[in-house]
Image (cartoon, grey):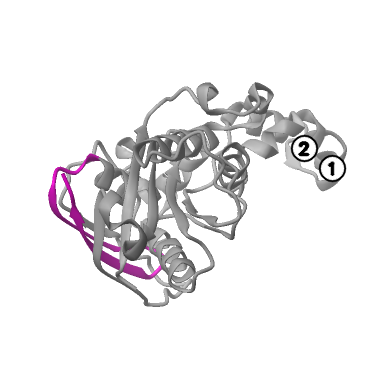
Amino acid sequence: MTGVVATGLGQVTGACDVRPYLRSPKMRKFMGPQDALAVVAVARALEAAGRHGAGLGERAGLFIAVGHLPFEQEDIDRLLEGSLVDGAFSMPAFAGAGYHAVNPLVTFRCLSNMPAFHASVNFDIQGPSFVTYPGPGQLYAALEEACAALDEGRVDTALLVGVAHQQNFLVQQHARRLVPPAPAERLVDAAGCLVLERAADAAARARARLVEWSLTYDPVHPFEEGRAPEERLDVLLPGELGAASLPVALALAPAGRLEHEVRARDGHHGRSAWEVLA
């Protein structure tokens, strides 16, 4: 399906203040950086679409790709310290002491479905949801699901979100261990959101039009050396944005044609072309 337009584009990179967008300020203590990034990007996209402040309800769905799961080093250090016996890892010590050394709220801040939860709660998104991870190839899986939901009439509004909290101890450790390694120094915290609607319903309000897109999958052998990812984009970004790269680029792009192509480590090959409107 290509009869899809984006009526709102929102993005955020780096640190952000999520408090103005929370229905309940108490929810902040349950949020990690990736949750805050996602909520701010959704809020800005809805504002751009003229939809902020109105509950979206059952006819809106959320389709989100989340980056590699973050965890803070000080929490891992406490977890490890309580799990050692004579310098070696002990499962009984982990279950009895290590597990309880970490604040239980930490788990809420690193789960891959939490950005979707916080976006849904704060903007009353009650329709279907789809969560995947961890990179830009997976964003195309979310785009595929969003377009299908619009095409089949299951939703009238599909929020496509990419978010990645990458200035994080665990994510950067993972980046260094990849083969070939990812450039950890270029990894940026970012989120982007597109408010997608059917062109037949919203052409007059369109900020960008999806011209064409494709997604293919080439399985990766788990015991062979990994492939280096490739990403081509017409907009200069401040670094590697992972799953957020396409929606952030669209939010920053000037009027004209924008093309994006990614061959991801996990075997996903996605490409799309968009007409960004003035």
Provide the secondary structure element on which disc 1 rests: helix
Q: Amino acid at mark 2?
A: Ser
The residue at the point 26 percent across, 53 percent down is 204
Rendered position, 25 above or below 116:
above
Q: Disc 1 marks which residue?
A: 95
- Locate residue 64 relative to residue 98 in the image: left or right: left
Provide the secondary structure element on which disc 2 rests: loop
Viewport quadrant of the C terminus: top left
Mark linked to residue 269: none
Rendered position, 138 above or below 241:
below
Count every numbered label the image shows and give the total: 2
Q: Pinpoint residue 45: horizontal percent, then vertical percent.
A: 38, 40
- Locate residue 97 relative to residue 16 in the image: left or right: right
Q: Disc 2 marks which residue?
A: 83
Q: Is residue 75 visible?
A: yes
The residue at the point 78 percent across, 35 percent down is 98
The reply to whether the magenta stretch includes residue 219 is no
- Please identify, in this view, whether the residue under mark 2 or under mark 1 is nearer the observer: 1
The residue at the point 47 percent across, 47 percent down is 174
Q: Residues within 10 Å of mark 1 (few under 14, many from 20)?
A: few
Q: Pinpoint residue 160: horizontal percent, then vertical percent.
A: 43, 53
Query: Which quadrant would residue 73 be assigned to in this image?
Result: top right
Q: Which residues are magenta?
A: 252-278
Q: Amino acid at mark 1?
A: Ala
Could you say which is closer to the camera, residue 44 or residue 237?
Answer: 44
Rendered position, 56 above or below 269:
above
The residue at the point 43 percent across, 66 percent down is 141
